[in-house]
């Protein structure tokens, strides 16, 4: 089981995090039982070097998160 946190803090939300939060409804069928999505208010971005939107897959922070990057990390952690 992998936990995916999607930042819906204001900065990330405006930079695409809101759309990422919707993506959870479209993950591949074979992952439905293996992935838990939760929303996070802020994953600790640093305003000077921020690369939003942020997501966290397990313990790994994903900068400029996209569905593709998140899916790649999920599959890596599940060793699919
Ligand atoms: S607002 Fe998204 S990581 Fe801080």
Image (cartoon, rainbow, N blue to C red):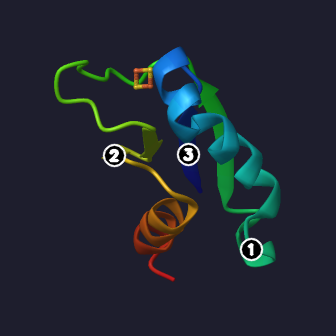
Looking at the picture, how far across and down is residue 36, in whole percent?
A: 67, 47
Looking at the picture, how far across and down is residue 57, in whole percent?
A: 45, 49
Image point (17%, 21%), residue name: 48
- Reading the image, the residue beneath label 2 is 63
- Is the residue at mark 3 in contact range of ligand 1, meaning its CB lies under 8 Å from it? no
- Quarter holding the N terminus is bottom right
Looking at the picture, how far across and down is residue 50, in whole percent?
A: 26, 30
Measured in 3D between alpha carbons, the distance from the residue under mark 3 to the one under mark 1, in whole angstroms, is: 14 Å
- Against 13, residue 3 (above or below) is below
In front: label 1 or label 2 = 2
In the image, is 5 to the left or to the right of 43?
Answer: right
In the image, is 26 to the left or to the right of 31?
Answer: right
Please tell me how crowded label 1 is: few (under 14), some (14-19), or many (20+) other residues with Cα within 10 Å: few
- Reading the image, the residue beneath label 1 is 28
Looking at the picture, how far across and down is residue 24, in whole percent?
A: 73, 52
Image point (18%, 29%), residue name: 49
Disc 2 is placed on an element classified as loop
Measured in 3D between alpha carbons, the distance from the residue under mark 1 to the one under mark 2, in whole angstroms, is: 22 Å
Q: In the displayed orientation, state which residue is furthest to the bottom.
A: 80
**Which of the two labelled residues, at mark 3 and mark 2, occupies the earlier sequence position?**
3
Q: Picture quarter containing residue 6? A: top right
**Which of the two labelled residues, at mark 1 and mark 2, occupies the earlier sequence position?**
1
Marks 2 and 3: in contact by CB < 8 Å? no
Q: Picture quarter containing residue 10? A: top right
In the image, is 75 to the left or to the right of 59?
Answer: right
Disc 3 is placed on an element classified as strand
| Residue 4 marker | 3
């Amino acid at each position: 089981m992998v936990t995916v946190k999607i930042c819906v803090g204001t900065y990330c939300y405006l930079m695409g995090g809101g759309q990422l939060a919707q993506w959870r409804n479209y993950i591949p069928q074979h992952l439905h039982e293996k992935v838990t999505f939760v929303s996070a208010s802020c994953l600790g971005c640093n305003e000077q070097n921020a690369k939003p939107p942020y997501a966290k897959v397990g313990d790994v922070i994903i900068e400029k998160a996209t569905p593709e990057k998140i899916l790649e990390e999920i599959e890596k952690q599940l060793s699919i």
